[in-house]
């Protein structure tokens, strides 16, 4: 009994098995990376990983699709999520000055300085 001796690329069964193998090796990891990237709010990495795994699987099979899957999986899970401002970019309410400081009291302004030179408009009088 020969295990792979009778395999002929011209046979229909060989082509069906080859197509199923490509789908399993390239499309399934690509879809996993895409859905994980979208669910983690990293759509760019998800789409990039999808196409990288898809084309890598078609080119070299599991030899390229597997490492690309691992790389994009690591990038999606380890990269910190984008920071979204909580309120349109305004500082949190505890960073605003207290309301009792508006309008400022007279004692909060510095005293006027009288040691400034007199205004000179160009006249020599």
Image: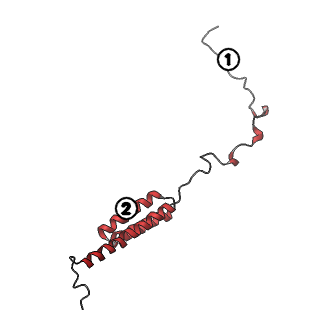
| Crowd tier of the residue under label 2, counting other residues whose Cα lies within 10 Å: few below 14, some 14–19, many 20 or above | some
- Position in image of residue 116 (x %, y %): 68, 22
Q: Residue at x 64, y 46 (%)?
A: 91
**Residue corresponding to mark 1:** 118
The dot on residue 3 is none
| Label 1 Cα neighbours within 10 Å, binned few <14 / some 14-19 / many ≥20 | few
SS assignment at label 1 = loop
Residue 49 falls in which quadrant of the image? bottom left
Residue 45 in the image, given as x and y percentages of width and height: 44, 59
Q: Residue at coordinates 73% horizontally, 23% vertically from top-left?
A: 114
Quadrant for residue 5, please give it.
Answer: bottom left
The number of numbered badges drawn on the structure is 2
Assign the N terminus to one quadrant of the image.
bottom left
Residue identified by numbered label 2: 51
Q: Nearer the viewer, residue 124 or 82?
A: 82
Q: Quadrant of residue 83?
A: bottom right
Q: Quadrant of the C terminus?
A: top right
- Of the two numbered discs 2 and 1 on the same chain, state the one appearing first in sequence: 2
């Amino acid at each position: 009994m020969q295990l792979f001796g009778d395999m002929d690329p011209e046979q229909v069964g060989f082509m069906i098995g080859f197509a199923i193998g490509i789908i399993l090796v390239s499309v399934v990891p690509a879809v996993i990376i895409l859905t994980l990237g979208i669910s983690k709010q990293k759509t760019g990495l998800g789409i990039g990983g999808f196409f990288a795994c898809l084309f890598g699987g078609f080119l070299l099979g599991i030899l390229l699709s597997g490492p690309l899957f691992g790389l994009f999986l690591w990038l999606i899970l380890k990269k910190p999520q984008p920071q979204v401002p909580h309120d349109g970019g305004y500082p949190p309410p505890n960073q605003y000055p207290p309301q009792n400081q508006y309008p400022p009291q007279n004692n909060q302004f510095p005293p006027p300085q009288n040691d400034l030179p007199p205004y000179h408009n160009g006249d020599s009088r």
